[in-house]
Image (spheres, grey):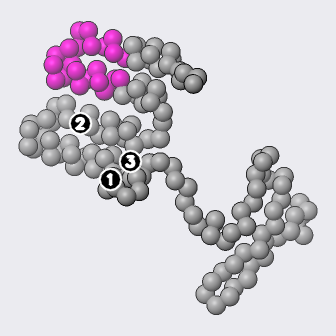
């Protein structure tokens, strides 16, 4: 027992494997939490839905964000997109961040404005996309089925 009344963790070393005998203290966990009894549960990774689907090829969600500087340089060298091609870097970062559609829409709206202004010259009126995205995201909700 240590100072706060709980037992200390015991560790046994068997060959090269290490096993832990940990005590479950219900004060440390929220209501409804159940301790996993399997030793494999310490090493499993939760499926967050960000990776490729099973049975298909695909990219992890962070891959475009990691490649975006290279895509920018490639677009600049191949097509001369140096002036407005930089937008790909923050857009890929926003895509890679774990957020819902409404938040992503608001985060992308300034870059949509800049892209519209630089590519098509819509500086005078394209700014309206930013407040419209904010209003739409605040007014969106899921329908009850």
Magenta-colored stretch includes residue 124: yes
Q: Position of residue 9 (x, y in %)?
A: 78, 71
Q: Which image quadrant: the C terminus?
A: top right
> Which is nearer the eye, 114 or 46?
46
Q: Nearer the viewer, mark 2 or mark 1?
A: 1
- Quadrant housing residue 110: top left
Provide the secondary structure element on which disc 3 rests: loop
**Closer to the N terminus: mark 2 or mark 3?**
3
Magenta segment boundaries in residue numbering: 109-130
Tell me what residue is drawn at x 31 percent, y 13 percent. 127
**Closer to the N terminus: mark 2 or mark 1?**
1
Residue 26: mark: none
- Residue assigned mark 2: 86
- Give the side of residue 48 with respect to residue 127, left or right: right
Tell me what residue is drawn at x 33 percent, y 52 percent. 59
Which residue appears farthest toward the bottom when viewing the image?
A: 15
- Quadrant housing residue 41: bottom right
Magenta-colored stretch includes residue 15: no
- Residue assigned mark 3: 61
């Amino acid at each position: 027992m240590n100072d706060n009344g709980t037992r200390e963790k015991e560790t046994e070393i068997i060959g090269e494997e290490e096993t832990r005998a940990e005590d479950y203290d219900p004060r440390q966990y929220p209501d409804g939490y159940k301790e996993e009894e399997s030793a494999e549960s310490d090493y499993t990774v939760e499926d967050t839905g960000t990776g490729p689907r099973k049975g298909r090829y695909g990219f992890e969600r962070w891959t475009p964000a990691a490649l975006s500087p290279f895509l920018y340089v490639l677009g600049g060298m191949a097509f001369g997109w140096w002036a407005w091609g930089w937008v790909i870097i923050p857009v890929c970062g926003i895509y890679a961040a774990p957020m819902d559609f409404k938040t992503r829409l608001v985060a992308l709206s300034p870059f949509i404005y800049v892209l519209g202004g630089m590519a098509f010259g819509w500086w005078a009126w394209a700014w309206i996309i930013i407040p419209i995205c904010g209003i739409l995201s605040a007014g969106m909700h899921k329908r009850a089925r």
